[in-house]
Amino acid sequence: MHTTRYPDFRNLRYFIRLAVGTFLSLTFACGRQEGPAPPPPPPPAVVVSAVTAANVPLYREYVARTEARETVAVRSRVDGYLEKVLFTEGSQVKAGQLLFVIDQRPFRAALQEARGGLAQAQASLNKAKRDVARLQPLVAESAAPEVDLDNAESAVEFSQASIERAKAAIAVAELNLKFSEIHAPISGIIGKQEATPGNIVSRDQTLLTSISSWDPMRTVSSISETDYLRLGQQHREDNPFIQRKNAAPFELIMADGSIYPHRGSLSFLDRTLDLTTGTLNVYVSFPNPDRVLRPGLFGRIRVVVETKPDTLLVPQRSVQVVQGVSRVLVVDKEDAVAQRVVTLGERFRDFFIVTGGLKPGERVVVEGVQKAIPGRKVRPTEQPIKIESLGG
């Protein structure tokens, strides 16, 4: 006979009560261990700077190339063998210093020959004069034909002309002998020796070396027609393109970014506009006592073209540009952060000129921008802008 067995519900109720009791005990124990909630974190620390109004000089920069005021290609003025070279390449030479000597023997011989021609012409003149003196009384007494006297007088004139020609030949020979010694035409830095002793040099053809003046050195820059009309024709007192005595408003920025220690003054503006490029050349003269500047160096000249009074400035690092819109984070008196859209003008060194969106004295975040959240508070540390460093 089959016997049906039913579950023991008494044991099941026992296990349910045990599970519920254990859960309540654990929940009560965990609740007692949590304790009070931790305090909120302090506001993030940021660095702020007050928007400052200052007199701001506006600069223009132009690519520049240095060139010597004087550069001379030294060539021979006579033909001959180069005998001596009397300078060191790259050294400083003075005007009149002896640089080269060409073999002088042919020129001395030519001078001696020319002097001999003069002596011969002088002897012929003396003979012709004696002939005239001898024939004049004979012709007067009809003892000699007049044609002989005419010939003698013609011989005098011919000899006188020969003397003048001989003197000219001597002058040429003396010049050629003088030209066989080649002297520095200007003071400056001498370049590479292009010919060595033993070479034949040709008159006005063979380049021997080049000399460039070095103090002052000048730069040449090209400015557009628009800049010239904007700057060159403004007859205000601080216009750098107007000639003024002792004015040196130009700075030279070297290729490595360093500032040349001496300021330059306007030398001149070119007489005409280049129709190919549409630019006008500007020449600026710089002192070069230490010979730092050499012809052919590239850099930039910088000049103040205008000074804007009471101009608002913000550090460039405080500005965020998103999709063409410039924004800054402003901290109010309660140290709360707000985002502000600003209108910017030109750059000046590490600053932007602000033309709208800010007022003098408002504080903008310059460090910790990522930690400053609009609508929340921060712990600001003020870092003032040094106004004295803004001058040109």
Image: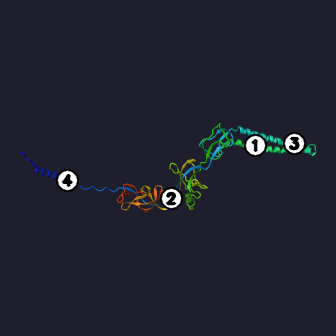
Residue 67 point in image, percent of width and height:
58, 49
Q: Earlier in the sequence, mark 3 or mark 2?
A: 2
Residue 175 point in image, percent of width and height:
71, 43
Q: Secondary structure at mark 3?
A: helix
Going by the numbered disc 2, the residue's amino acid type is Pro
Residue assigned mark 2: 57
Instruction: Report whether 345 appears left or right of 380.
Output: right
Distance from disc 4 to disc 2, alpha carbons, whole Å, reads 73 Å
Residue assigned mark 3: 131
Numbered disc in front, either 4 or 2: 4
Name of the residue lying farthest toward the top: 198
The residue depicted at 75 percent of the width and 42 percent of the height is 170
366 vs 326, nearest the viewer = 326
Q: Secondary structure at mark 2?
A: strand
Other residues around mark 1 within 10 Å, as few (<14) / some (14–19) / many (≥20):
some
Numbered disc in front, either 3 or 4: 4
Instruction: Report whether 113 appears left or right of 288.
Output: right
Q: Are marks 2 and 1 in contact (CB under 8 Å)?
A: no
Q: Earlier in the sequence, mark 1 or mark 4?
A: 4
35 vs 162, nearest the viewer = 162
Q: Are marks 1 and 3 in contact (CB under 8 Å)?
A: no
Q: Are marks 4 and 2 in contact (CB under 8 Å)?
A: no
Distance from disc 3 to disc 2, alpha carbons, whole Å, reads 92 Å
379 vs 27, nearest the viewer = 27
Going by the numbered disc 4, the residue's amino acid type is Thr
Going by the numbered disc 3, the residue's amino acid type is Asp
Going by the numbered disc 1, the residue's amino acid type is Ala
Residue assigned mark 1: 169
